[in-house]
Every structure is written in C-alpha cells, then in structure tokens.
C-alpha cells in the first residue's frame, strides 16, 4: 500500500488541500508560506497568460482546436502569415505543412460524411427489417 503525503493546509471550509506537499515541507507549492511570493507570481503569470490567450482568440477569431471550424480558422491564419513571409525555405515549409494539414482535415471531413451516410443507410435498413418482421408477426 502506498501512503501518499498530503499538504497540511486547511481551507477556510475546513477541507484539507488534496495536493502533494513539497519535498521536506508540510505544504504544497500554493500553500507553503515560504513560497508565498513565488506562488503569487505564478498565479499572476497564469492570469496574464489566460488573458493573452483570450485577447488573441478574439483578435484572430479563433474558436479553438476542438472543431473542424477552429482548425480551419487556424490554418487560414497560418497561410495568411506564411504567404506574407520573405520567400525562402522557412516560408515554403510553412505553406507545405499547412497544405498537408488542410488535406488531412479534408480527408477527415470526407470520412465523417461517408460514415454518417453508412450509419444512416444501416439504420434505414434496420427499420426496413423491423417493419418486415413486424408485418410477418401480424400474420
Ligand atoms: Zn496545499
């Protein structure tokens, strides 16, 4: 059995902190009084980072990479910036990489459409079979 050490900090609601403590310290990074300044700086940088990500997402109209639309939008930005670079090997690599990524995106989209069509055909076939069996049972 593994005995896991836990941070000794008690939250205001009395619940214990679930984080592992620092080596040779009773507290985790966030709750160690000796690391309070470092923890505050880390939180400040994390906040700046999230704000910067939000600002860039709005400025570039990036919906995120969890949808085809979002990935396509990112590739549009990359192509626009890549076209604007001085001509040379880095520019050509950016454009080729973007073309490869866009091709893969098209393939995935095509496969999704074909799978959806197949699933619809199977579901349609099953309902035809059910109807046929239902008709036999009624005889
Ligand atoms: Zn803690």
Image (spheres, rainbow, N blue to C red):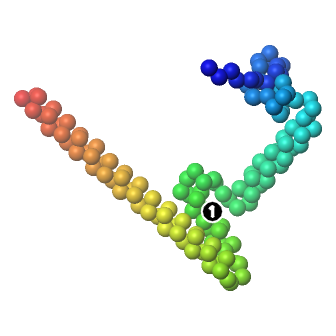
Task: Judge left or right: residue 87 versus residue 30.
Answer: left
Q: Secondary structure at mark 1?
A: helix
Quadrant of the rendering where the C terminus is positioned: top left
The vertical placement of 136 against 103, above or below, is above
Task: Judge left or right: residue 80 versus residue 131.
Answer: right
Residue at 20% across, 36% down? 130
Residue lying at the far bottom in this picture: please name it: 87
Q: Position of residue 78 (x, y in %)?
A: 65, 68
Q: Position of residue 68 (x, y in %)?
A: 53, 57
Task: Judge left or right: residue 103 versus residue 94.
Answer: left
Asked which quadrant contains residue 95, the reply is bottom right
Q: Is residue 136 visible?
A: yes
Quadrant of the rendering where the N terminus is positioned: top right
Q: Position of residue 10 (x, y in %)?
A: 82, 19
Residue at 14% across, 34% down? 133
Task: Judge left or right: residue 1 versus residue 24.
Answer: left
Q: Is residue 28 visible?
A: no
The vertical placement of 10 against 113, above or below, is above
Residue at 76% across, 23% down? 6
Asked which quadrant contains residue 124, the reply is top left
Q: Is mark 1 within 8 Å of ligand 1?
A: no
Q: Nearer the viewer, residue 87 or 34?
A: 34
Residue bearing the label numbered 1: 74
Residue at 61% across, 67% down? 76
Asked which quadrant contains residue 136, the reply is top left
């Amino acid at each position: 059995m593994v005995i896991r050490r836990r941070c000794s900090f008690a939250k205001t609601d009395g619940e214990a902190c679930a984080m592992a403590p620092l080596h040779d310290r009773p507290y985790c990074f966030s709750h160690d009084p000796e690391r309070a300044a470092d923890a505050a700086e880390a939180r400040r940088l994390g906040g700046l980072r999230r704000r910067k990500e939000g600002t860039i997402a709005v400025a570039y109209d990036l919906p995120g990479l969890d949808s085809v639309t979002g990935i396509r939008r990112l590739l549009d930005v990359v192509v626009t910036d890549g076209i604007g670079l001085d001509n040379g090997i880095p520019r050509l690599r950016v454009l080729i990489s973007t073309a490869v990524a866009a091709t893969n995106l098209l393939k995935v989209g095509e496969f999704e459409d074909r799978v959806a069509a197949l699933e619809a055909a199977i579901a349609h076939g099953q309902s035809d079979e059910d109807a046929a069996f239902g008709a036999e049972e009624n005889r």
